[in-house]
């Protein structure tokens, strides 16, 4: 968290600042600038007008009439616009809602503001971020695109779907939910996914993203309540197995996920 669903929510919220002019852009936590000079970033943004609010995968983009501002939210970052949040809380997002967690702020000439609140400091801000390395957008991925993502790889299919360079937008919760719905073992290697399964998996990715967007977040999947030790599969009642795949905690049903 947040995954593409949450960042899309932030994008819609950020549409409110389109047309506003930046009065100041202090880095309250320079760590998130990833080595960029805070004074340079500030100088590049002050006086610029926000032209749009866009998203690629889990990256929020705010093009200005100068540079493009890229915002990454890590595991616990939330967007606040004019003091209000479109998402009240995130899994693993810390307890409470402390303004001391504010890492970056844009103040506008009309007295309003936009800020990122991030307890774990894993997000970041970047000017003119390179997006060319990102894979196709998960919410609209086609069977042909997914076939290219999986082709010839002996990486675990879960690890491949988590890799933003191959498919942009999915995180741990969405991948586990999607593979559970598609009946695919997360640890199976990509080259073991049969050609006939690729369209099924592509459809599962798209429909899972769409359905959980309607429900309100990546944490609203059917599998979510069973992501605890000792739980059973919501589909067939089989005890779930917990493992680490692609470096992430993974839950799978040994009966229907093959």
Image: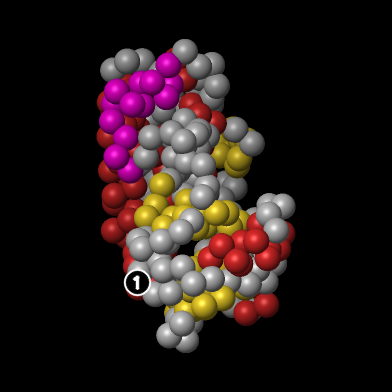
Drawn side of residue 184 relative to residue 45, left or right: left
* Observer-nearest of 70 and 230: 70
Dominant secondary structure of the residues highlighted in magenta in the image = helix
* Observer-nearest of 45 and 76: 45
- Answer yes or no: is residue 34 visible: yes
Pinpoint residue 78: horizontal percent, then vertical percent.
Answer: 52, 66
* Observer-nearest of 116 and 173: 116
* Observer-nearest of 215 and 225: 215
- Magenta region: 139-151
Of all residues shown, which one is farthest toward the bottom? 111
On screen, residue 196 above or below 229: above
Q: Residue at x 68, y 63 (%)?
A: 38
Pinpoint residue 119: horizontal percent, then vertical percent.
Answer: 65, 67
User: Which residue in the structure is indicated by mark 1?
Assistant: 19
Drawn side of residue 2 relative to residue 141, left or right: right
Secondary structure category for the residue under label 1 = loop
Pinpoint residue 6: horizontal percent, then vertical percent.
Answer: 43, 58
């Amino acid at each position: 968290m947040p995954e593409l669903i949450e960042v899309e929510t932030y994008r819609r919220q950020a549409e409110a600042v389109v047309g506003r002019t930046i009065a100041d852009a202090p880095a309250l936590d320079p760590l998130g600038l990833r080595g960029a000079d805070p004074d340079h970033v500030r100088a590049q943004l002050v006086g610029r007008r926000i032209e749009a609010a866009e998203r690629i995968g889990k990256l929020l983009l705010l093009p200005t009439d100068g540079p493009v501002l890229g915002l990454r939210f890590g595991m616990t970052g939330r967007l606040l616009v004019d003091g209000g949040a479109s998402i009240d809380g995130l899994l693993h997002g810390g307890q409470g809602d402390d303004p001391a967690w504010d890492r970056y702020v844009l103040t506008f000439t009309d007295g309003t503001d936009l800020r990122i609140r991030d307890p774990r400091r894993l997000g970041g801000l970047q000017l003119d971020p390179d997006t060319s390395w990102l894979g196709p957008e998960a919410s609209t991925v086609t069977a042909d695109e997914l076939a290219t993502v999986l082709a010839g790889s002996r990486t675990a299919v879960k690890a491949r779907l988590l890799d933003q360079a191959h498919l942009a937008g999915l995180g741990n919760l969405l991948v586990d939910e999607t593979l559970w719905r598609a009946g695919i073992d997360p640890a199976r290697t990509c080259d073991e996914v049969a050609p006939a399964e690729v369209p099924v998996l592509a459809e599962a990715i798209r429909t899972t993203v769409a359905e959980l967007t309607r429900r309100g977040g990546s944490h609203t999947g059917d599998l979510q309540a069973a992501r605890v030790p000792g739980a059973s599969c919501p589909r067939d009642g089989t005890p779930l197995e917990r493992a680490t795949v692609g470096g992430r905690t993974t839950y799978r049903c040994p009966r229907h996920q093959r």
